[in-house]
Amino acid sequence: MAGNVPCSVAQGIVEAKATQILDTKPKAHCVVIDAGNRNIYVPGLGGDIVMELTFDPVTGTVSPNAPGEVATRAGAGPRHLNFHPNGKFAYLITETTATIGTFAVDPALGTLKELQFVDTNEYKEQPAASDIHVTPDGRFLYGAERKTSMLIGYKIDPDKGTLTQIGRFPTEKTRRGSNSK
């Protein structure tokens, strides 16, 4: 049993009946659940949106929240979302424009409100940002960009959640992920 969904394991593969199949914009890239396990956010890389969903723990299903999505700039390619430890802010990295957005989180409504978008650099060719992490103490944020193999660091304003760049740090070639712990 995994949660309330019956599962069977055959030859190392977990199999379960889908409780729900959700229609998304192209390339839904990750699923992020808030600390209260009530609200779910799904960046849609090909649709330039972040879906806002409400989770029903009784049925194990989700439904669109009102308004149900937050749009990003056309062609931005929202990829990964990460929460600040205080739960008041969420950070979104976009793959194709390599920007990082700061959003205020309304935990009661499950909605995101854009506060800021920052560029990670001026690129000579189309960037390919990949991952984002907030440090456990909530003081810093790091985003990865694959084509330049850089981690871009930001200081987080503790009251506003906004970002100020502190540096760019070379990393392994074509870095896709990082761990801030």
Image (tube, rainbow, N blue to C red):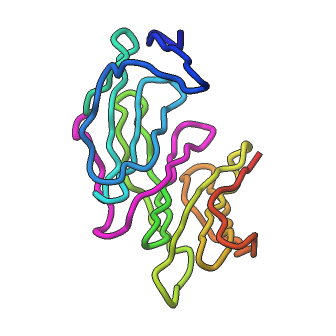
When asked about the image quadrant of residue 21, the answer is top left
Relative to 42, does residue 170 appear above or below in the rendering?
below
Of residue 156 and residue 76, the one placed in the foreground of this image is 76
The answer to whether 31 appears left or right of 19 in the picture is right
Instruction: Point out residue 154 in the picture as x, y percentages from the top left corner.
Output: 65, 64
- Which residue does the image show at 55% across and 62% down from the upper left? 130
Residue 19: image x %, image y %? Answer: 33, 19
Left or right of residue 134, residue 70 in this image: left
Count numbered badges in the picture: 0
* Residue lying at the far bottom of the rendered structure: 124
The C terminus appears in which quarter of the rendering?
Answer: top right
The x, y position of residue 33, in whole percent, is 48, 33
- Residue appearing at x 37%, y 9% in the figure: 58
In the rendered structure, does residue 6 fall within the stretch colored magenta? no
Q: Nearer the viewer, residue 90 or 75?
A: 75
Please report the bounds of the magenta region as a residue range: 65-91
Up/down of 127 relative to 4, above or below: below
Q: Is residue 43 above or below residue 56?
A: below
Left or right side of 143 for 56: left
Q: Taking 106 as reference, is 168 left or right?
A: right
Residue 112 x %, y % = 37, 45
Residue 13's image quarter? Answer: top right
Asked if the magenta segment contains residue 66, the reply would be yes
In the picture as drawn, the residue positioned furthest to the front comes out as: 11
Q: Residue at x 50, y 47 (%)?
A: 90
Look at 38% across and 27% down and name the residue there. 108
Taking depth in this image into account, of 141 and 146 the one nearest to the observer is 146
